[in-house]
Image (cartoon, grey):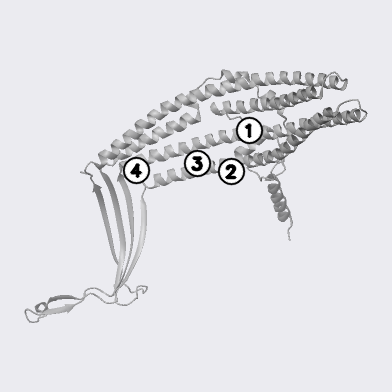
Amino acid sequence: MNRKPILLLTLFLSFVGFSQEVPEQFSLQEAIDYALQNNRTVINAAKDIDAAKAQKWETTASGLPQISAAVDYQNFLKQQVQVIPAEFFGGNPGEFAEVTFGTKQSVTAFATLNQKIFDGSYLVGLQSAKVFLEISQNAKTKTDLEVRKAVINAYGNVLLAEESISILERNLEVLQKNLDETTKIFENGLTEEENVEQLKITLSGVESSLNNTTRLKTLAYQMLNITLGIDVYHPTVLTDDLETLTQQNISLGLLETENNVENTIDYQIAENDKVSKELLLKLERSKALPTLNGFLNGGYSAFSDDFDFLDKEQNWFGSSLFGISLNIPIFSSGMRSAATQRARINLEKAETDLVEKSQQISLEIAKAKSDYQFAIEDYDNKKENLQLAERIENKNQTKFFEGISTSFDLRQAQTQLYTAQQEFLQAMLDVINKKAELETALNIIETN
C-alpha cells in the first residue's frame, strides 16, 4: 500500500488546522484586521451582501423564461351520468336515454413555458435589486467602521486597566514602605498615632482601587475577545502599550482633513434611502401600465377504463397551445392615484432627510475634530500636571519624615498624585478613542 498520499493528506490537514488557530498576541492594528474578518457582526454583514446578490439574481430570473411541468391522474369512482333524447338512438320521442361520456381513468402530462414580454414593475424591480445590493454593501462598510472603533475602545480599555494596575501596585508598595517606617517611628514615640492612621486610610483606599481594577481588567479582556470574534475566555496578550499608542495617534494633519460629507457612509446610506423611495414612486406609476405575457403549452393525454397507461399499446394524444395575455388597468377608483401620491410624499420626506443628514454629518465631523484636538491638548496638560504632582508628593514625603509637614499634608499630596495618574491615563486613552471617532466620522479605515 502506498502511504505517501496518506502522509501528504495528514500534513495538509495539520497545516489547515494550524492556520485556523486563533492567535494569542495582538497589536492594535492586528486586532483591527482580525476583527474585520472574524467579528460576528461583520460576518453577518458579509452574508447580507451574499443574500442581496442572490436576491438580485432572483429578481432578474423572474423575468426570464419559466418552465413548469405537471402530471394529472384522474379516476372516476362513479362517472357522471348524462341524459339525451332516446330518439337519437331510435327510441320513442319524449323519452331519454342515460349515457356516460369518456373513460373512467385518464392521465395528462404537460409542460408550460411562461415569459414576461412587458411589465413595468419588473423593470423597477431590477433597479431595486441593484439598489438593495448597494444598501447591503454600505451597511457592511458602516459595520466595519463601527467594529474598528469598538476594537480600538476595547483594546484601549485593556491597556488602561493594565497601566492602572501597574501604577496602583507601585503606589501600594511605596505606601506600605511609608507605613512600616512611620509605624516604627510611632513605636519609638517620635510621632503621633494619627500619622499612622492617615497612612492606613490611604493604603486601604489604594488596595480597594487595585482590587476593583483587577476585576475590571478581566472584564475588559473578555469584552475585547467578544469584539474580536473569539472565545470570551481566550488567553489574549496585547503587544502595544498605552503611551506608545498615544504618541502614534497624535496626528494634527487629521484635523486639516477636508469635510467631504458626500463621501461619508452615513450620507451614502441616506442617499440609498432616497433612491429607494424614488423607485417606490416608479413602481406605483408602473402599475398604471399594461402588462403583456406569453405562454406555450404542450402535452399528452391518455384515456382508459383500466389503469394500463404503462402498456406499450396505450394511445397518447398530443396537444399544444400558444397564447398571449394582455392586461390593461383602466379604473381603480383612485386607488393607484392615492398610492402614487403617498409614494411621492415619502420621496419628498427622504429628500428632506438627506439634507438634514448632510447638516448633521458636517456637525458631527466638526465636533469630532474639536474633541480630538481637545484630547491632544488635555493629554499635554495632564502630562505636565502629573509631573508637578509627582514633585509635590516627593517634597511632602521628605518633609513628613523630617517632621516639617503633617500626615494630612502628605495624604493630600498623595491623593492629588493618584488623581493625576488616573487623569493622565484617561487622557492618553481619550487621544486614541477620539481619533478613532474622527476617523469613523470621516469614513477612514486603515488596514495592513
Q: Earlier in the sequence, mark 4 or mark 1?
A: 4
**Could you say which disc has been placed on residue 40 in the image?**
2
Looking at the picture, tell me which residue is in the foreground, 420 or 290: 420
User: Which label lies toward us, 4 or 1?
Assistant: 1
User: Which label lies toward us, 1 or 2?
Assistant: 1
Q: Amino acid at mark 2?
A: Arg
From the top left corner, tell me how far across and down residue 113 is, in percent. Answer: 33, 54
> Is residue 133 placed above or below 438 in the rendered structure?
below
Gap between marks 1 and 2, in whole Å? Answer: 17 Å
**Could you say which disc has been placed on residue 153 in the image?**
1
Gap between marks 4 and 1, in whole Å? Answer: 46 Å
Q: Quadrant of the N terminus?
A: bottom right
Q: Earlier in the sequence, mark 3 or mark 4?
A: 3
Gap between marks 4 and 2, in whole Å? Answer: 35 Å
Q: Earlier in the sequence, mark 2 or mark 3?
A: 2
Q: Amino acid at mark 4?
A: Tyr
Horizontally, is 195 left or right of 294 in the view? Answer: right
**Could you say which disc has been placed on residue 49 in the image?**
3
